[in-house]
């Protein structure tokens, strides 16, 4: 195991995050604040409580997830795609590193960034609504698991993308709808029965439900199932990455 | 001594069906400079890429310092530095950060003294805090060399180090290569400039259509394959070449009043003595004589034409 290499990649990626701090941090915080103002204050005041939680507070976990998912994917995919685009990826191929070190470095950094962003948004939410977190440990665990598994997913997108368009496609066309339809802004139980069943095929539902349980102690989905689904998603991503590097698919000719 | 780099029966067929390498065998001794010479698309870059881990071979094997480049890739790659053909650097990174990054990738602890020595040797020390995008093309190329050297490799691959580079920078690059050789680094460079191989290489490998046509010491190659020319300057203009000299296939240039005689440098009999005898028998007075070795370029062209 080449730990110097992991550290090298990790600190290089984190350096980019801090170099572009305004971009990395301000834009997610700003957009989340806008959500709070519009959904929490303006519209939320006319919506009744859900499971005994005010609407403004109810959407906090969903909004954090929304940012964390998109940030994990865009950070991780960009991190590995950019050297590919520049050609500087040759260094990774010629260095004495295996995919384990490469993934640890890039995905570790991407997950760290999005976890930081998630925490900053959580702090921002405190300014707009009153809420408390019932299970702090579980909240952090869910946050980290989500950051890691979706950074892995982003890494796959970055490896497989041939151009910037493809890089943007998945976050835009897949993740945003999944998050919006995944119960960020409503409880699944508010949907008609047919759509409740459809929703169960959306992996993001499990994330948001579990994350919301950590906050308020109520969930649409059984907690164990939520955890199991995240773990499954993570292992599937790990498997795909392992296979990609083993076969050299999209990496080596 | 065991060769530092050993390539056996290495072949590569790309998915498109293109056969880039055909069963290449090559041993390289520690400390030498080998130039792989060949036209574009000959397979030079593919060969280097397989050894460095960028491309998977279809069959055959290569080992560096006794380590197989696929099975023992960690040990093998630790011994290798690669300077790629294309300039590809992270634009926002400083020169120093770029070096630290690479050294880390190769599993080595930061060594400020060493990095300073490398940067000074490549005249980049003043630019250590500059972002790579602010550098000139020549400096960027030197940054790539510095990056390739910062984990102290024993074998350095230079893929077309002087492609698209002006004459001055080219000379500068050659100087860098000579310095590295003096430091004991084994260097394999690809080039399609013959004068480059002639200027810096110890051995020359000629590669064409994926085949390694030959590998020879530069001098041996030139001696073995080379033609020599003798130019004889005359006292008096010569209206026509006398019939007695016809068998020498002489070329006469009226402009500088000289006869040119070509002969095989490695021939048993060069024919010079009899030429002189026949010249004096014909009453032709000589003013000056010079002989010249043909260049690697002439040899290369001859070789490539032979095979096609």
Image (tube, grey):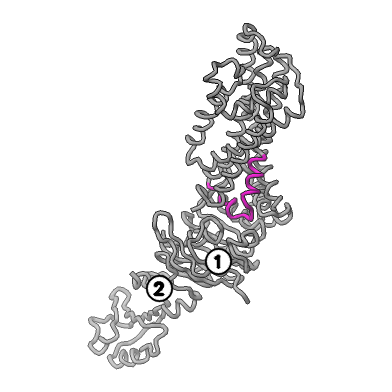
Mark 1 burial class by Cα count in 10 Å: few <14, some 14-19, many 20+: many
Using a 10 Å C-alpha cutoff, classify the residue at mark 2 as few (fewer than 14 neighbours), some (14 to 19) or many (20 or more).
Answer: some
Label 2: state its secondary structure.
helix
Q: Residue furthest top?
A: A46
Asked where in the image residue B175 lies, by quadrant, the reply is: bottom right
Mark 1 on the same chain as mark 2: yes
Looking at the picture, tell me which residue is in the foreground, B110 or A1.
Answer: A1
Rendered location of residue A159, percent (x, y): 54, 43
What is the chain identity of the residue bearing mark 2? B
- Subunit that carries the residue with mark 1: B
Q: Is residue B28 magenta?
A: no
Say which residue appears at 51% left-offset and 76% top-offset: B217
Does the magenta run of residues contain A98?
A: yes
Q: Which residues are magenta?
A: A87-108
Residue B22 versus residue A9 in the image, above or below: below
Q: Secondary structure at mark 1?
A: strand
Q: Is residue B242 left or right of residue A145?
A: left
Q: Write down the residue under mark 2.
A: B299
Which disc, if any, is residue A30?
none
Sequence-first tag of 1 and 2: 1
Residue B127 visible in the current orientation: no
Q: Report which residue position mark 1 lands on.
A: B62
Please say if B191 is above or below A13: below
Residue drawn at x 54%, y 47% as measured from the top left: A244
């Amino acid at each position: 195991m080449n730990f110097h290499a992991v550290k090298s990649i990790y600190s290089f990626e984190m350096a980019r995050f801090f170099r572009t701090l305004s971009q990395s941090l301000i834009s997610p915080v700003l957009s989340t604040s806008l959500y709070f103002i519009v959904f929490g204050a303006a519209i939320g005041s006319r919506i009744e409580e859900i499971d005994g939680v005010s609407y403004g507070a109810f959407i906090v976990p969903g909004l954090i997830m929304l940012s964390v998912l998109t940030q994990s994917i865009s950070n991780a995919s960009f991190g590995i795609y950019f050297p590919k685009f520049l050609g500087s990826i040759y260094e990774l191929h010629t260095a004495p590193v295996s995919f384990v070190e490469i993934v640890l470095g890039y995905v570790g950094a991407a997950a760290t960034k999005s976890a930081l962003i998630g925490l900053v948004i959580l702090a921002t939410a405190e300014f707009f609504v009153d809420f408390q977190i019932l299970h702090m440990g579980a909240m952090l665990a869910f946050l980290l698991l989500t950051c890691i598994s979706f950074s892995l997913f982003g890494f796959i997108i970055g490896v497989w993308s041939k151009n910037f368009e493809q890089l943007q496609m998945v976050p835009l066309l897949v993740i945003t709808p999944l998050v919006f339809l995944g119960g960020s802004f409503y409880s699944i139980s508010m949907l008609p029965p047919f759509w409740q069943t459809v929703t169960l095929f959306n992996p993001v539902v499990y994330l948001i439900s579990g994350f919301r349980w950590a906050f308020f102690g109520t969930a649409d989905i059984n907690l164990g199932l939520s955890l199991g689904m995240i773990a499954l998603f993570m292992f599937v991503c790990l498997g795909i990455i392992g296979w990609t590097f083993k076969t050299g698919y999209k990496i080596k000719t | 001594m065991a060769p530092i780099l050993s390539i056996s029966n290495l072949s590569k067929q790309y998915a498109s069906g293109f056969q880039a390498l055909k069963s290449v065998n090559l041993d390289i001794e520690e400390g030498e400079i080998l130039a792989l010479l060949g036209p574009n698309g000959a397979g030079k870059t593919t060969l280097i890429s397989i050894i460095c881990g960028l491309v998977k071979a279809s069959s055959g094997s290569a080992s560096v310092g006794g380590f197989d480049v696929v099975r023992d890739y960690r040990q093998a790659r630790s011994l290798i530095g690669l300077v790629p053909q294309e300039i590809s650097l992270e634009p926002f990174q400083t020169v120093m950060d770029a070096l630290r990054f690479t050294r880390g990738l190769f599993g080595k602890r930061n060594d400020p003294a060493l990095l300073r020595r490398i940067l000074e040797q490549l005249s980049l020390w003043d630019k250590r805090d500059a972002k790579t995008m602010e550098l000139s093309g020549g400096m960027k190329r030197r940054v790539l060399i510095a990056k390739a050297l910062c984990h102290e490799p024993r074998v350095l691959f230079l893929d077309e180090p002087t492609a698209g580079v002006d004459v001055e920078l080219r000379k500068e690059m050659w100087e860098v290569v000579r310095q590295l050789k003096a430091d004991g680094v084994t260097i394999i460079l690809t080039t399609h400039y013959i004068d480059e191989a002639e200027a810096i290489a110890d051995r020359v490998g000629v590669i064409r259509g994926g085949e390694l046509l030959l590998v020879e010491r530069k001098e041996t190659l030139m001696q073995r394959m080379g033609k020599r020319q003798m130019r004889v300057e005359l006292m008096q203009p010569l209206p026509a070449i006398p019939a007695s000299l016809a068998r020498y296939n002489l070329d006469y240039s009226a402009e500088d009043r000289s006869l040119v005689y070509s002969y095989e440098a490695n021939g048993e009999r060069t024919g010079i003595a009899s030429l002189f005898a026949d010249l004096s028998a014909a009453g032709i007075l000589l003013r000056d004589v010079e002989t010249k070795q043909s260049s690697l370029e002439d040899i290369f062209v001859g070789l490539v034409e032979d095979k096609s």
